[in-house]
Image: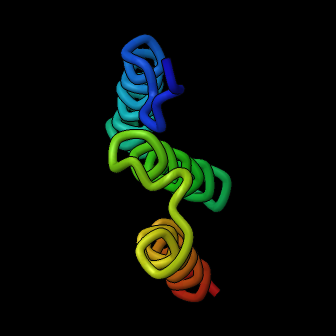
Amino acid sequence: MTPSRFASTKTLFIIWVVLIVSTLITAYIGYLELSGYYFVGFILLMVMLKGQLIIDHYMGLKNVRGFWRLAMLGFVYVIPGIIFTGYYLSSV
């Protein structure tokens, strides 16, 4: 039997639980209307973590090299960086 390049069902279930818990945490922070650099930074870090998990495991791009992986990871890291920069510059 050759090893599969796809994640096992158990791994995908654990990742799904992590995605749900992180979504609930960030939604609760939003519900409490907490703001500040630490909260915004934490929420954007959670966005990056969730995006990385989705790209690697659900989209199957973990072992892919080249344009598609870089394009997807660009969205995951560049867009939250732009959002945080805008948040920072709006309060200066």
Question: Which of 90/64 is in front?
Answer: 64
Residue 54 percent location from the top left of the image: 39, 45
Residue at image point 45% right, 55% down:
61
Question: Which of 53/6 is in front?
Answer: 6
Q: Is residue 87 visible?
A: no
Residue 26 percent location from the top left of the image: 43, 38
Outermost residue, top direction? 10
Residue at image point 48% right, 43% down:
53
**Left or right placement of residue 37 versus residue 90 in this view:** right
Question: Which of 3/56 is in front?
Answer: 3
Residue 45 percent location from the top left of the image: 59, 53
Q: How is the image coloured?
A: rainbow
**What is the total number of numbered labels drawn onto the structure image?**
0
Q: Is residue 42 above or below residue 92?
A: above
**Left or right placement of residue 71 versus residue 46 in this view:** left
Q: Is residue 69 visible?
A: yes
Quadrant of the drawing holding the C terminus: bottom right
Residue at image point 55% right, 47% down:
49
Residue 63 percent location from the top left of the image: 55, 54
